[in-house]
Image (cartoon, rainbow, N blue to C red):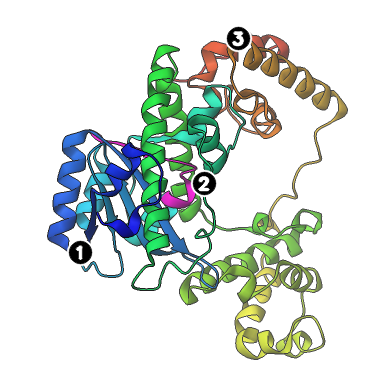
Amino acid sequence: MSSELRGGDGPEVEARLDSVVDVRDADALAAACEACRAAGTVVVDTEFERTDTFYPRVALVQLATRETVWLVDPLALEDASALRALLEDVSVLKVLHACSEDIEVFAHWLQAHPRHVLDTQLGAAFLGQRFGIGYGELVRLELDVEVDKQETRSNWLQRPLTAAQRRYACLDVIHLDVIQARMRARLELVGRLEWVLEETRAVVEDVLRRAEAVVDWRALKGAAALGPRALLAAGHLAAWRERTARALDRPRNRVARDEHLLGLAEALPEDVEALRGGLLPHGMVKRWGGELQAAVDAARSAPEDELPEPPGPPLSRTHGAIIKRLRGEARTIAGELGLAEELLARKRLVELWFEVDEEVPGPWRGWRWPLLGERLLALLDRPGARPSS
């Protein structure tokens, strides 16, 4: 676009820095999205702030095809519906790295449900790279380029952006575009591209599901040790905090810390005056004492048949031994296939076989099933189990 973006990254990169387009209105955004749709594949990244808010505050969206880079300014846009349509268009592949936070940004800002997404962090794992590899490490391994991280924590909500910020934002998507093209070719060669798309789809769905999930006592670290009535109170208090944090757009721990709500749930005080006796910070009682007491009272007065079941005991030693064997088998398969072992063998994934009321847990019904399903069933002694269609 201009000399301010130049910095000696090689002729191809410099040429692409000359093709940067700023997008600040709906017409320019519509034109950018149509160009991305025509290309069939677009690399996407976001810059956002989330220091003092519950929701991410989107500051910049970068889009890139082989021909053009667009810097989309959300602060200037009054209508971003064209971007939402692009994100939800199943005919266009959207490529992101470590996409969870970006998906959350789009879900809150645009109420978008991105579809047909490929996460290059997952793609790298399916090609044997470290599970959860960072963007900078991936760029270094794939392109032998060191990413300058100086602008990562800069103020992306300021306007105008500095030349260094603009360059950083452009290079993020330019480098990722080169990587994703090579990565997709390798994934297709070994027959794993669909696996990555399936796994990315699961990540996207999980992010969107968590955004809408009903909050209960599990949101408070340490609540599992409480008795049934205190557990119900913890659930009411956690749900109150979630509603309040969302309404005020403040981080959860700026509304109430876990330990304060746990102490309140365990004490089950009879009135607001008891809250002033040291259970909670004075300012918290002054502002929300009545609401907190109402949550506690709802638990105190609940009939016995409404109390939650305490969480089950930890898995037995027998189960632990089986899980160890299952993970060992999964590691062997991952090693044979050159996959990051966490795709098959991370503990939480294997424990699902003992925690869900399904013969085959959801994450094991897709690409994992042909690789490992029958072997795990044999170890679990469940010969008749099959994934549901």
Label located before the other in sequence (3 or 1): 1
Residue 363 pos. (x, y %): 54, 28
Mark 2 lies on residue = 147
Please state which amino acid type lies under the numbered disc 3. Answer: Glu
- Marks 3 and 2, how far apart in space? 43 Å
- Does 95 appear in magenta? yes
Q: Quadrant of residue 165?
A: bottom left
- Marks 2 and 1, how far apart in space? 33 Å
Label located before the other in sequence (2 or 1): 1
Residue 128 pos. (x, y %): 58, 22
Q: Quadrant of residue 256?
A: bottom right
Q: Please tell me how crowded label 1 is: few (under 14), some (14-19), or many (20+) other residues with Cα within 10 Å.
A: some
Q: Is residue 384 visible?
A: no
Please state which amino acid type lies under the numbered disc 2. Answer: Val
- Which mark lies nearer to you, 2 or 1? 2
Q: Which residues are magenta?
A: 90-102
Mark 3 lies on residue = 374
Helix, strand or loop under label 1:
loop
Please state which amino acid type lies under the numbered disc 1. Answer: Asp
Q: Residue 168 vs residue 223: left or right?
A: left
Q: Is residue 30 visible?
A: yes
Q: Residue at x 22, y 33 (%)?
A: 40
